[in-house]
Image (tube, coloured by chain):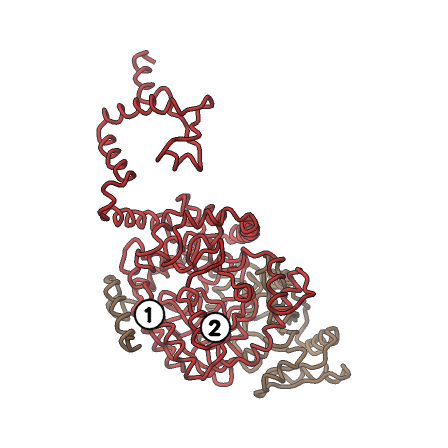
Chain colours: A brown, B red
Amino acid sequence: MKQPVESRQLILDRIHAATPAAAGDASQLADAYAALPRTYIRRSSLSTSARIKLMIHRLREYDAEVVESTPADLPAAITAQLAASGRHLFVAPPGTPNKWMVTSARKITGLKWTIDHGLPIGEIEKAEGVVTAATCGIADSGTIVLHHSATEGRRVLTLLPDYYLCILRASQIVETLPEYFSRCQQPPALATYISGPSATADIEMTRIKGVHGPRILVVIVVRDDK
Amino acid sequence: MSHATPGRVSLDPRFAPPFPEAALIMLRNPQLRKNVGHAIDVIQAKRGKLVVEKTDWQELRSAASAIRFHVLDNLGAYLEQFEARCTAAGGHVHWAADAAQARQIILDLLRQENATEVIKIKTMTSAEIQLNPFLQASGVNVYETDLAEIILQLGDEDPSHIVVPALHINRSQVREIFARTMGLNNLSDDPKELTNAARTYLRQKFLTVPTAISGANFLVAETGTVAVVESEGNGRMCLTLPQTMISLVGIEKVLPRFQDLEVMLQLLARSATGERMNPYTSLWTGVTPGDGPQKFHVVLLDNGRSSILAKEKERQTLKCIRCAACMNACPVYRQTGGHAYGSVYPGPIGAILTPQLMQMKYAQTLPFASSLCGACYEVCPVKINIPEVLLELRSQVVNQERKQAGRVFDLMYLGLRIANLIFATAWGFHAAQRMGRIGLRFFTRKDGWIHSLPSLGAKWTQTRDLRGLPQQTFHQWWATRAKEGK
C-alpha cells in the first residue's frame, strides 16, 4: 500500500500529464477564469414590493407561515407567533436583541427563553422552538440564508427544535441567487441555505414535510423598506 | 461481492452480467417497472415546469459547462488551492489514488477516533468504492441517515438511481422493510408514518454517534469550502452534531470560486428533483470553533478519474454534477430501472462513466445501452454530450473486440467485413439490393413487414419487426422518371 504522501504526488502527476492546456501561472489562470461566459441573469427585474411579495409567495408555497410586521411592531409580532405556536421553551442565539424576548416573556405565561452560550446539545434538543435573524432572503427560490453570525446562531440551533421562527428584514431580500452572491464580498466560513421546511420525497415521490429539521417554519418579514 | 438473491444483479461492474442479460431480468419484473415509471413521471413533470419558467436556463447551462471545462483544464492548480485553503482553515486533506486506498484512509481515521459506529450522509462516491461492506467487515457499524438509504440498508437492497436511490421500492415494500427491521408491526404504508418511523429510529443515532462520513456536491478552491446539498436535514445533523467528519470527494468536484455556486445551485435542484432550491444547502470551511465537528478530513478520490481526464472526447464525463436528469429523461432507463446497469451509476451518465472508471476492462456493454436519442444531452445542466461519448466508447469496445483472435471468424464481424466490401461500390450495392429483395420476399408477410427471420437475423426480429424491402428502389424510380421525361 502506497503512503498517502506518495498518492498525492501520483495523482497530481497524472492530472498534470492529462492537462497540457493548463494555465501556466496564477495570473494566466485568473485571466482564463475571467473570460468564462456569464450571460445569465444576475440582477433584479422586480420592484421592491413585487420582490417582497414574491419571497412571501415562495415561502408559502413551501408551507411556511409568513406574516409581515414593521420594525416597531416586531416584538408584538414575535409574541403573537410564539403564543399561537402553543410552545413555551425557546432558545435563541447570543446576539438576539433583548426587545425580541422581553415582550413575549412578559405576556405569555410559562414562556422561557434560553440563550445559547454554548448550551449542551441535550438542552437544545429539549427546546420546543428557536428564534433567529437571517443574513439574506432570495425571492426567486424562497430561500433563507444563514451565515451563522451572533444573531443567527450556530448551525445546530436552527436544526434540532421542531419549530423555527425566522426574522427576515425586507431590506435583506434580493430577487436572484447571483445578487446574494454579489453581496458576499467576504465569503462566509459557514452558511446554510434553507428553502422551506425539511422534506423528503423518497417514498413514491410523495412530499413529506419534516424529516429531521424543524417541521414548522414561520417567517416574520419586517418591512424596513417603507 | 456476489448476491445470492434470485433476480438480483451485482452493482460491482466486475461481476455484473452484460447489460442485455441484466435488462431482461428487470423487464420481467412488472412491479419494479411500475415503481420506476411512476417516480420518473413525477420528477419529469416537476422539472419541466421549473425549467420553462427559468428564462436564462440555456445561459446558465453554458456558464456551467464553461466553468466545469475550465476546472478540468486546470484541475491540478484548483485542487492544490483547495487543499491549501482547507488546511489553513483547520481541515486535513488526504489523497486516495484508488478505491482500496480511500477505504483504508477512512478506516485508519476511524480507528484513530476509536470509532465503532459511524453515521453517513448519502454519498454515491462511497457506494462506488464499496465503503459500507468494508467498514462493516472491519468492525465499524455504519448507519445510513438519508431516508432512501435507510430503506436500502435495512431492506438489504441496492441503489437504482443516484438522487432517489430507492425509487424502485414502493410504499408497501417500505412498510414491510421497516416493520420487519424496526419491529413496528402496526406500521401503516402511509409515507408520513413511514417517514416518522425513520425520524425516530435515527434521532438517537444523531445525538450519540460521534463520527460521520459524507460526500460533497462541490468543493470551492478559492475558500476551501465544502458544499452538501440535501432535503431532509439528515445532512445538517451529520454536519453539526458529531465531533469528527470525514468527507469523501471525487477530484473532479472542485469549483474555482465561491461565486460559481450561483450557477451550479440554480441548475442542480431544478435538474435533480424539480425544485427551485433543495430544502437545505450546507457550506463549511475547515473547522469553526464552537460550531460543528472539530476534526474535519477530506479524502480526495481519483479511482480512474485522472485517466478519463487525459482523453479529449471523454473528458466531458467529469463535468457531471450528479443531478440524474439524464436517467430521468432516458427511455432505456425508464424501462429497465437502474440495477440493469450493474453499477452504482446507472442511466446514460453511468453508461459512459462506469466503463471508463473501470479502465474499459469491464462494463463494455453499457455504451450500447442507449438508443442515442440525445434526450440526456438535452437535459444535462452542464451540457455533457453523452451520445458523443457513447459513440466514442462503442468504437473503443469494437476495436478491443476486433483485436481478439477468436473474432476473426465471428459471424457478426465477418458479416460486417463483407458488407464493407459490398457497400464500397455502386454495382455491389445494387446487386445486394436485388438479391435482398429476392431473398427476403420469402419472409415478408402480406402487410409488408418481416416478423421473424432465421438464425442471425432472429437477433433483430425477436424484439422488433423489420419493414420488407420495397419492390422499387429510389434509384430505379428516379431512372424511370427521367426516361418518361417528367
Report the chain holding disc 1: B
Circle 1 residue: B78
Give the residue at x 26% y 23%. Answer: B431
Report which residue position mark 2 lands on. B283
Q: Quadrant of residue B424?
A: top left
Answer above or below: position of B24 versus A63. above
**Placement of the C terminus of chain B among the 4 image quadrants:** top left
Quick check: B28 above or below B320?
A: above
How many numbered marks are there? 2
**Residue drawn at x 56%, y 70% as measured from the top left:** B233
- Mark on residue B421? none
Is residue B219 toward the left or the right of residue A200 in the image? left
Going by the numbered disc 1, the residue's amino acid type is: Tyr
Sequence-first tag of 2 and 1 = 1
Question: In this view of the protein, can residue B250 be seen by the observer?
Answer: yes
User: In the image, are marks 2 and 1 on the same chain?
Assistant: yes
The residue lying toward the viewer, choosing from B49 and A142, is: B49
> Callout 1: 10 Å neighbours few (<14), some, many (20+)?
many
> Considering depth in this image, is B424 or A32 the residue closer to the camera?
B424
Q: Residue at x 40, y 59 (%)?
A: B320
Secondary element under disc 1, as helix, strand or loop, is helix
Q: Residue at x 42, y 31 (%)?
A: B452
Foreground: A69 or B258?
B258
- Subunit bearing disc 2: B
Measured as percent of width and height from the top left, residue B317 is found at 36, 57
Of the residues shown, which amino acid type is indicated by label 2? Leu
Report x, y in % for residue A28: 27, 67
Disc 2 to disc 1, how far (Cα)?
Answer: 18 Å
* Left or right relative to B358: residue B259: right
User: Relative to residue B485, is residue B292 drawn left or right?
Assistant: right
Rendering coords of residue B282 (x, y %): 50, 71
Residue A173 visible in the current orientation: no
